[in-house]
Image (spheres, grey):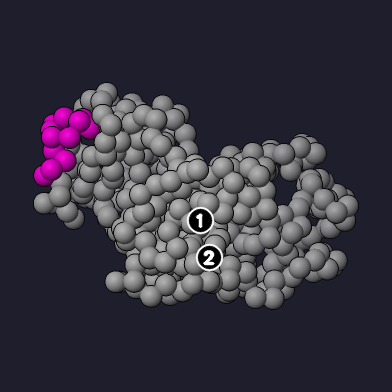
Amino acid sequence: RHSTKRDSRVSGSSLCDVARNVSGFPFRQPQSSSSFMKGENTQQLVIRKRLLGSPCRRTFSVHREDDRRHTCVQAVSSQVPSVASDSSALEDCSDKVLIIGAGLAGLSCAENLQKSGVDYVIVDADDDVGGRVRTDSYEGFKLDRGFQVFIEAYPEVRASLDYSALRLRRVFPGALIWRDGRLHRVADPVRRPIQSVSGLFSPIGSVVDKLRVFLLRVKTQQRSVDSILGQSETSTLEFLQRAGFSSAMIDRFFKPFYQGILLAPLDKSSSRMFEFIFKMFADGETSLPADGIGAVPQQLARRLRPSSIVLNTGVAAVAQAASGAAVSLRSGQVVKPRAVVIATDGETAQKLITGVQGDAATQFRELVIG
């Protein structure tokens, strides 16, 4: 019922074969101007989460190694060996720090506590570590949940991860933008000077706009991260307008691309964060681990004591207790750890601390917001 032209770069089972195994699979067709990072071995698909046992939709990045360049590891388990499968590790945690959330923040927190000799335990409602940074395997394909790229220049990432073990595969330094019924390539003028020439006259802003992108690149590379994050702040939209970018360039490139990264409209996002991310793209390569973006949290988790990670265990609420905090699990169990770290998204964190009152609530909310 659904068909598409097979990409000759994808070996083995075609992406259509994956599609036909999922009822009602549609390829997402661009409806308006949009942009996305183009990887040589990456395709964006919309697949029903029925692959994972649920009927709701979820976006995946699908990538498979090209036989001409790499050998694909056909099926890599995403599970961390010997992770606790029940909440028995929580029975006595009065001397432990309880970390809620096994995403990148929670795993990094645990590693720092471990290095400092502080005992801890991590709980997460999901069936694996990673939070929003996950990769599933399906018939030899790696399925990244959501649009994922690995920006190699992030200072904390460089300090925390073993890049060689991730076997990073770099993507094309630029973007493909859908406009006027076809895709237009915009390339990094420094890394891909020849390809960038063809994009000078594309309908994605004017030639002057593209010159301003180059000048902004040079400017941000000359500045330190501290100076960018320490400067006065405005909205990203106002920053771009002050920099002289046309409405066409903002609407056709910056909005679709950076709103997907910042997860907020440009008029609601920080100019400091925009400049920081822009600098990271300029300073380093953009890539994906050979085993998918999920290899990042897996690497962090392997450094921790396996018994300290408790999966499939949701937290219902965090409340005050006479000796500190009391954490209620969805199972009905109540644990009273030495301290609590909420390493979740802001919305989830706010829901968990609704029962906390007074100064403790203020301190919690300051941590969540800050």
Residue in front for this viewpoint, 61 or 68? 68
Answer left or right for 224 relative to 150.
Answer: left
Residue in front for this viewpoint, 119 or 274? 274
Secondary structure beneath label 2: loop
Residue in front for this viewpoint, 195 or 301? 195
> Which residue does the image show at 53% across and 51% down from the upper left?
20
Secondary structure beneath label 1: helix
Residue ranking furthest to the top:
247
| Dot 1 crowding, Cα within 10 Å, few <14, some 14–19, many 20+ | some
Find the distance from the CA under tag 1 to the CA under tag 2. 8 Å
Which residue was labeled with disc 1?
A: 18
Q: Is residue 369 visible in the rendered structure shown here?
A: yes
Amino acid under disc 2: Glu
Height in image: 250 above or below 183?
above
Q: Are marks 1 and 2 in contact (CB under 8 Å)?
A: yes
Amino acid under disc 1: Val
Main SS class of the magenta portion in the image: loop
Answer left or right for 126 relative to 59.
Answer: right
Tag of residue 54: none
> Residue 145: x percent and y percent?
53, 52
Q: Quadrant of residue 95?
A: bottom right
> Residue 37: x percent and y percent?
34, 48
Height in image: 232 above or below 304?
above
> Which residue does the image show at 26% across and 48% down from the upper left?
174
Q: Is residue 141 magenta?
A: no
Q: Is residue 205 magenta?
A: yes
> Which residue does the image show at 85% across and 54% down from the upper left?
331
Q: Which residues are magenta?
A: 197-209
Image quarter hosting the C terminus: top right
Going from the N terminus, do you reach mark 1 or mark 2 first?
Answer: 1
Tag of residue 139: 2
